[in-house]
Image (cartoon, rainbow, N blue to C red):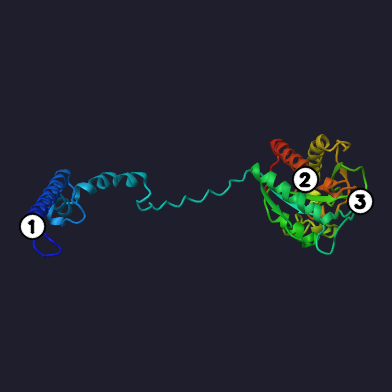
């Protein structure tokens, strides 16, 4: 049927054609729907409930999570997600075991007493404190117990320094100095020798020897003469140290000298003084560099002195 615009009358040919077109469109839509169902997907304009596969997948998503569940143990095996096991605190190291005599190092001077001063800035009190610390480190490494009469810029008296040494059994006293003169880069060791060594009790006690005399009176030694009973041991120690120093400080003597060093007189133990030359160096750093050879010389000398049979029990 055909439709005439002028008369408004429909004609059979046009109706047939429209019907054919509608049938064809329905066929195409059916084909598209069938293809979508077979491939597991629906077109965007088709409701989700028309796809059984999608409905099944949305209700049971477990298969998609299985790979994650199988991979989850991996981080636990690496230890990153496990709580850290508290570590046990290691026990403190055992205290050092000291063998042999106690070494009392005496950095001379201190405080307002600067000692020798050089024109280029070398100051004795500062240098000898550096020496004492270096020697202490070396001696402790070798197992000696070391005491310093001062470890700062203080200035203990001679008696205070001697008291520190006299409070230890089997002590050895070493006083450190830097000279104002002498061949630069040399080292000398001194021990104390009295002009007259006091022996025995005073004459007044001898005169009264027929009477009852307390035993302790005859054994008393004046404080200023405490070194008198250790002169020979101090002499031997001085020679041993001087021999070691001569090997590392070129031009140094090979035997020790005796000098009335005030700091040694009241020490009731083997005691020596070591003097490095001198504060008149052009570069004060050269004096600081002598700390290492000095420490090694003293350590080896003390080991040799101890091996020779040093043993005192006060």
In this view of the protein, can residue 216 be seen by the observer?
A: no
Q: Quadrant of residue 210?
A: bottom right
| Position of residue 3 in the picture relative to residue 143 (left or right) | left
**Element under disc 3:** loop
Residue 291: mark in rendering = 2
| Position of residue 40 in the picture relative to residue 78 (left or right) | left
Residue 180: mark in rendering = 3
Residue shown at 77% from the left, 55% from the top: 218
Tell me residue 109's x, y (percent).
82, 58
C-alpha separation, residue under disc 2 versus residue under disc 1: 128 Å
Is residue 134 or residue 307 the one in the foreground? 134
Q: Nearer the viewer, mark 2 or mark 1?
A: 1
Q: Which quadrant of the rendered structure holds the N terminus?
A: bottom left
Is residue 45 or residue 128 the one in the foreground? 45
Do the residues under discs 2 and 3 have CB atoms within 8 angstroms?
no
| Position of residue 62 in the picture relative to residue 312 (left or right) | left
| Position of residue 83 in the picture relative to residue 275 (left or right) | left
Residue 61: mark in rendering = none
C-alpha separation, residue under disc 2 versus residue under disc 3: 18 Å
């Amino acid at each position: 049927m055909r439709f005439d615009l002028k008369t408004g009358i429909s004609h059979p040919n046009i109706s047939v054609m429209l019907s054919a077109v509608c049938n064809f469109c329905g066929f195409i839509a059916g084909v598209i729907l069938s293809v979508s169902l077979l491939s597991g997907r629906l077109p965007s304009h088709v409701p989700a409930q028309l796809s059984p596969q999608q409905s099944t997948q949305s209700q049971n998503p477990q298969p998609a999570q299985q790979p994650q569940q199988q991979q989850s143990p991996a981080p636990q095996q690496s230890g990153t997600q496990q709580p850290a096991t508290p570590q046990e605190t290691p026990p403190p190291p055992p205290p050092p075991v000291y063998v042999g005599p106690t070494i009392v190092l005496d950095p001379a001077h201190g405080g307002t007493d600067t000692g020798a001063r050089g024109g280029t800035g070398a100051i004795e009190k500062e240098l000898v404190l550096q020496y004492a610390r270096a020697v202490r480190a070396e001696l402790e490494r070798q197992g000696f117990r070391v005491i310093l009469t001062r470890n700062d810029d203080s200035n203990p008296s001679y008696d205070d320094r001697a008291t520190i040494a006299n409070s230890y059994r089997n002590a050895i006293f070493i006083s450190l100095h830097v000279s104002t003169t002498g061949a630069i880069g040399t080292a000398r060791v001194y021990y104390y020798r009295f002009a007259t060594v006091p022996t025995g009790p005073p004459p007044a006690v001898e005169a009264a020897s027929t009477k009852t005399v307390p035993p302790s009176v005859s054994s008393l030694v004046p404080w200023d003469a405490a070194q008198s009973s250790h002169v020979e041991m101090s002499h031997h120690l001085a020679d041993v140290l001087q021999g070691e120093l001569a090997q590392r400080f070129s031009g140094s003597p090979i035997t020790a000298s005796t000098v009335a060093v005030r700091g040694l007189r009241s020490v009731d133990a083997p005691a020596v003084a070591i003097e490095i030359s001198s504060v008149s160096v052009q570069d004060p750093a050269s004096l600081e560099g002598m700390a290492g050879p000095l420490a090694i010389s003293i350590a080896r000398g003390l080991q040799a002195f101890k091996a020779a049979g040093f043993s005192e029990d006060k």
